[in-house]
Image: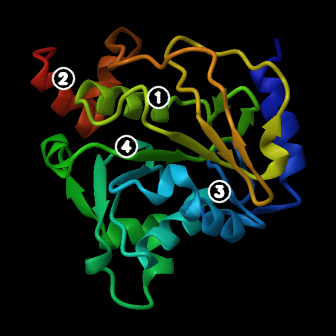
Amino acid sequence: MANSRMVRQRIWERLAPVARPDTRFHFDFSEFIPDFEGSETLAACLLDHRTLSSARMVFVTPDNSLVAVRQKLLEAGRPFVVSSYNMLRGFLLLDPAKVPTGHAHYAAWLDGIEHFGRPVSLEDISGLGPFGAMVTGASAVSTDGIRFGKGHGYFDIEWGIFSDLGLVQETTPVIAAVHDVQVVADRLPASDTEIMVDLIATPTRMIDVERARKRPRGVNWDLLSPETIASRPPLRELARMRGIQ
């Protein structure tokens, strides 16, 4: 079984020549998942793929690597929900009708999401209907569907929130969009809360994954500190809904 820290370090070294720097973190991949050469090609192919083409509502993480995916969704007139950075300001809805013509590229960036996006509560999101797909970036992803993020587990928490609300289920496609150098054959360690993916999208190929196990349902509150719950609006809201706080 590969060591997750060593795999991340190896991938970061391979990623550096093809990665695009972040305005805040430069090339510190421990702080963000970078955009990369070929992400525009990846996005165009992904929007035509069966897992995403028929999805009415999509959840997309705010990773830099998904700027082109978010831009293509907006240009195609397709709304999506995105989390704010580290979920500190909850979730936002990006409605293409609210983005002026020619501004989709800016609206797809983290700052643009905050500018054009409308903050939405869990109650609001539930009213939008279930997600047809979830798209996430990753530091690394194995060919058997195990993904690593930055190490904070926010995507796993987001899945837990949405599965608790019935907005995603076992058959909801989860897509990891990464550069080819981020795909590994290693057997990566996975916790019980790890969300395995169904599709790995890269600039050169689409890899269907046969998942070895089912995904967990709901939020594992025992793994979250009171500070984490208190500082994330969606967790506070769900905790109130479930009588936890």
Q: SS class of the residue under badge 3?
A: loop
Q: Amino acid at mark 1?
A: Asp
Nearer mark to the viewer, of 4 and 1: 1
Nearer mark to the viewer, of 3 and 1: 1
C-alpha gap between disc 4 and disc 2: 15 Å
Q: Residue at x 25, y 37 (%)?
A: 234
Choose between 207 and 195: the one closer to the eye.
207
Q: SS class of the residue under badge 2?
A: helix
User: Is the residue marked by circle 1 packed among few (<14), some (14-19), or many (20+) residues within 10 Å?
Assistant: some
Residue 157 image position (x, y, % from top left): 40, 28
C-alpha gap between disc 3 and disc 1: 23 Å
Residue that badge 3 annotates? 25
Residue that badge 2 annotates? 239
C-alpha gap between disc 3 and disc 2: 32 Å
Q: Is residue 61 shown above or below 144?
A: below
Residue 105 image position (x, y, % from top left): 51, 79
Q: Amino acid at mark 4?
A: Met
> Residue 103 sits in which quadrant?
bottom left
C-alpha gap between disc 1 and disc 2: 16 Å
Report whether residue 84 is seen.
Answer: no
Mark number for residue 156? 1
Report the coloring of the rendering: rainbow
Quadrant for the N terminus in the image: top right
> Residue 100 sits in which quadrant?
bottom left
Residue that badge 4 annotates? 87
Q: Earlier in the sequence, mark 1 or mark 2?
A: 1
Q: SS class of the residue under badge 4?
A: helix
Nearer mark to the viewer, of 3 and 2: 2
Quadrant for the C terminus in the image: top left
User: Is the residue marked by circle 2 packed among few (<14), some (14-19), or many (20+) residues within 10 Å?
Assistant: some
C-alpha gap between disc 4 and disc 1: 12 Å
> Residue 239 sits in which quadrant?
top left
